[in-house]
Image (spheres, grey):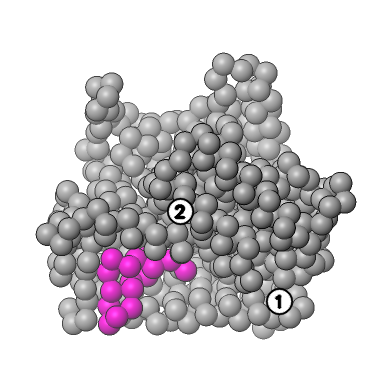
């Protein structure tokens, strides 16, 4: 394989998944589609420049015929027709077992936002999901000695690869890093060909869906799989994609089963894409809920679009986790989950997401009551009529000192944990992933850029933001300082105070993690080929 290089720490068992045949398969995908992926990522920046200059978003005139014609996607396979409760989480071994045993319909094993992409996490994660599909996965806790094995009945496994913007820098081809999406997708598919089900994240254009369709068809052909063996669900978690749901379904119609309301990343992307616009400033994160008009419009349009096309419309994440030793606080948290899932099931969603096994029975009971059949595809929601103005409506609310400080505090806590290798972090009784830190730092950047005013009238200028950053960083350091906090503080401050808003926090943070890896391994401990 000319021009292909690996430079990575050695991970026990990696020879089981990084076989010569698997690597050749990955190289084939990257050779054929790598340049096209990079061009599509550059296209996103062109959209950003247009929005920065005062442009807007709307339904695309060139694809009107796709939206107007009647067509449907390929029917879902039997094991994906009832998806009333899905649980998500990272790919560590214990989590995979617990999630599959949780009683949920499906488990999305996440190589993306709830996972720090260290080489060890990526390789061990591939081993874990392979063992889960084989039914051989087990785990013994080294401290308690407790043994974990799969139950007789388990959830259906889906895998989320990293987004198209991410690169797997341990592998290069012709001097370019391999696509992290292609690495995660291709390696899983190569070793798990029976029921290769995926969630595809962070698309921003139907041409990105077309790229994925071509990658999937190419992969099926190379592996001798029938067309439609691979099945995908696409997360609608960017504002440009909300205007192109029909088009995304159409491009992937041979392989797609549904769309999902990736609500937290959607809020992040909304802020980011309109970050240079003073007329698109959102209030405190805590005030931006799914009852806000722009979010409610997006979720109902997703349901209507999916059901018209015969696809599942999956609801969003309930990030709450049980609160021990505080009955009142736990009841309040569960009441929020209940209200959220009742709204989703009543609106016509075909299922929902939870972040903790304890929430599975609650969500399931709600959907069982509202949805006696496997799904609600027959609920066509012809009453829904969503316009571009609905999708772009800015919610009213306040920006408070408490909300600003919380963005700093939560962003720092999450980034510290991410740099330490953990991308799924319980913070203040919510299970947070990278979207949390992304919302926090983009809101702070936008508020500072436009000198938005706090509820008490103070402008959020550079001196005020610097003061709050210094104070919140100081509070965390007083509780216990370490290298990960120091690096998180440096990165987060740079993100918030930069002249230009960075596209993704995780791309720069990934370089820091790579630096840690190289420091901790000698030349003899690294795999090079």
Secondary structure of the residue carrying numbered label 2: helix
How crowded pointer 1 is (Cα within 10 Å; few <14, some 14-19, many 20+) is rated as: some
How crowded pointer 2 is (Cα within 10 Å; few <14, some 14-19, many 20+) is rated as: some
Quarter location, residue 302: bottom right
**In the rendering, at what x and y percent does residue 401 appear?**
76, 45
* Image marks 1 and 2: residues in contact by CB distance under 8 Å: no
Residue 176 part of the magenta segment:
yes
- Answer with left or right where residue 498 lies relative to residue 170: right
Going 47% across and 46% down the picture, which residue do you hit? 485
The disc at residue 487 is 2
**Discs 1/2, front:** 2
* 492 to 212, vertically: above or below: above
**In the rendering, at what x and y percent does residue 384 appear?**
78, 56
**In the rendering, at what x and y percent does residue 486 appear?**
46, 50
In which quadrant will I find the C terminus? bottom left
Going 39% across and 68% down the picture, which residue do you hit? 167
Q: Earlier in the sequence, mark 1 or mark 2?
A: 1
Secondary structure of the residue carrying numbered label 1: helix
Specify start and end residues of the magenta stretch as a single range: 165-180
**In the rendering, at what x and y percent does residue 54 appear?**
77, 78
Please indicate, yes or no, whether residue 222 appears anywhere in the rendered image. no
Quarter location, residue 34: bottom left
Quarter location, residue 339: top right
- Answer with left or right where residue 171 lies relative to residue 181: left
Going 62% across and 23% down the picture, which residue do you hit? 330
* Most common SS among magenta residues: strand
The residue at which mark 1 appears reads as: 52
């Amino acid at each position: 394989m000319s021009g292909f290089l690996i430079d990575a720490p050695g991970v026990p068992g990696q020879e089981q998944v990084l076989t010569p045949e698997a690597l050749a398969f990955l190289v084939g995908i990257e050779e054929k589609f790598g340049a096209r992926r990079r061009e599509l990522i550059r296209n996103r920046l062109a959209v950003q420049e247009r929005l920065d200059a005062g442009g807007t978003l709307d339904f695309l005139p060139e694809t009107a015929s796709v939206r107007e014609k009647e067509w449907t996607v390929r029917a879902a396979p039997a094991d994906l027709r009832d998806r009333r409760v899905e649980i998500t989480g990272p790919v560590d071994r214990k989590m995979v077992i617990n999630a599959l045993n949780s009683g949920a319909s499906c488990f999305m094993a996440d190589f993306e936002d709830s996972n720090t992409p260290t080489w060890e996490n990526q390789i061990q994660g591939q081993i874990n999901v392979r063992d889960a599909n084989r039914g051989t996965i087990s785990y013994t806790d080294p401290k308690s000695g407790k043994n974990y094995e799969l139950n007789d009945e388990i959830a259906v496994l889906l895998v989320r690869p990293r987004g198209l913007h991410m690169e797997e820098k341990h592998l290069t081809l012709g001097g370019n890093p391999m696509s992290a999406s292609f690495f995660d997708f291709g390696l899983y598919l190569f070793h798990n060909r029976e029921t290769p089900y995926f969630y595809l994240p962070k698309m921003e254009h139907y041409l990105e869906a077309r790229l994925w369709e071509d990658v999937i068809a190419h992969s099926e052909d190379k592996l001798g799989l029938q067309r439609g063996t691979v099945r995908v669900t696409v997360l609608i978690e960017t504002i440009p994609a909300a205007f192109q749901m029909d088009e995304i379904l159409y491009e992937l119609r041979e392989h797609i089963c549904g769309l999902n309301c990736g609500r937290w990343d959607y809020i992040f992307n909304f802020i980011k894409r309109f970050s240079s616009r003073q007329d698109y400033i959102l209030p405190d994160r805590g005030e931006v809920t799914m009852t806000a008009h722009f979010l409610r419009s997006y979720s109902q349009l997703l349901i209507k679009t999916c059901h018209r096309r015969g696809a599942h419309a999956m609801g969003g994440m309930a990030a709450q986790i049980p609160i021990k030793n505080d009955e009142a606080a736990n009841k309040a948290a569960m009441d929020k989950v209940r209200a959220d899932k009742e709204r989703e099931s009543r609106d016509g969603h075909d299922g929902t997401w939870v972040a903790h096994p304890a929430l599975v029975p609650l969500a399931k009971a709600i959907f069982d009551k509202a949805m006696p059949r496997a799904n609600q595809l027959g609920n066509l929601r012809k009453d829904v009529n969503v316009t571009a103005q609905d999708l772009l409506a800015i919610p009213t609310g306040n920006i408070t000192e408490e909300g600003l400080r919380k963005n700093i505090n939560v962003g720092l806590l999450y980034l510290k944990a991410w740099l330490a290798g953990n991308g799924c972090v319980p913070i203040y009784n919510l299970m947070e992933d990278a979207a949390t830190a992304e919302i926090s730092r983009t809101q702070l950047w936008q508020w500072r850029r436009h000198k938005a005013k706090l509820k008490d009238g103070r402008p959020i200028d550079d001196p005020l933001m610097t003061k709050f950053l210094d104070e919140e960083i100081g509070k965390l350091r007083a509780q216990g300082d370490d290298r990960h906090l120091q690096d998180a503080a440096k990165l987060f401050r740079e993100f918030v105070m930069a002249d230009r808003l960075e596209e993704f926090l995780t791309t720069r943070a990934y370089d820091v993690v790579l630096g840690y890896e190289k420091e901790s391994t000698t030349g003899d401990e690294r795999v090079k080929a």
